[in-house]
Image: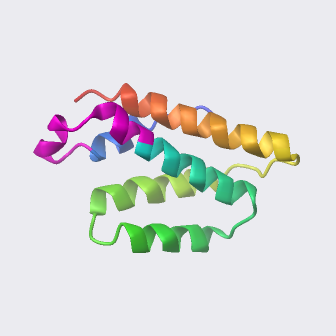
Amino acid sequence: MKISFSILALLFFIDASAVENDLESRCETISQYAEGIMIARQNGKPMIETMQIIDQRFKGIDALHAMYSSMITHVYGLPIQQTKENKALAAEEFENEVFQGCMSTPM
């Protein structure tokens, strides 16, 4: 399930004022959304419903909308795990992967 979101995470930092904000806090927020997207996928939520949430929440914020839409497209290409434990593990691993990619994004 290894995928680099460094370029997508970089979009989060395009605003010059973003340099002044706490990288760890921003990456935590991004990774929490990633976990939520994976949980939605693992619970069988239709992709269109997950996209609609992102459309509403990030309307007019193009960089974030593009980043989360790309995450959704990636995650919905992955299989749904069969057990509750594996579903939780998939969400946790994806959250950690996105957090790691975000934290390693050069400013």
Task: Look at the picture and state if 52 lies above or below 29.
Answer: below
User: Is residue 7 among the parts visible in the rendering?
Assistant: no
- Residue 103 placement, left or right of 79: left
Residue 22 is inside the magenta segment: yes
- Overall secondary structure of the magenta section: helix
Q: Find the residue positioned furthest to the left.
A: 16
Q: Residue at x 29, y 56 (%)?
A: 63
Residue 55 image-quadrant placement: bottom left
Residue 21 is inside the magenta segment: yes
Which quarter of the rendering shows the C terminus?
top left
- Residue 3 placement, left or right of 80: left
Which quarter of the rendering shows the N terminus?
top right
Q: Residue at x 43, y 45 (%)?
A: 30
User: Is residue 30 among the parts visible in the rendering?
Assistant: yes
Q: How many marks?
A: 0
Task: Look at the picture and state if 11 lies above or below 102.
Answer: below
The stretch in magenta equals 13-28
Task: Look at the picture and state if 76 lies above or below 6.
Answer: below
Q: What percent of the width, then of the height, locates residue 71?
A: 51, 51
Colour mapping: rainbow
- Residue 11 placement, left or right of 46: left
Q: What percent of the width, then of the height, locates residue 2?
A: 59, 31
Q: Residue at x 42, y 45 (%)?
A: 29
Q: Residue at x 60, y 39 (%)?
A: 94
Q: What percent of the width, then of the height, locates residue 77?
A: 66, 53
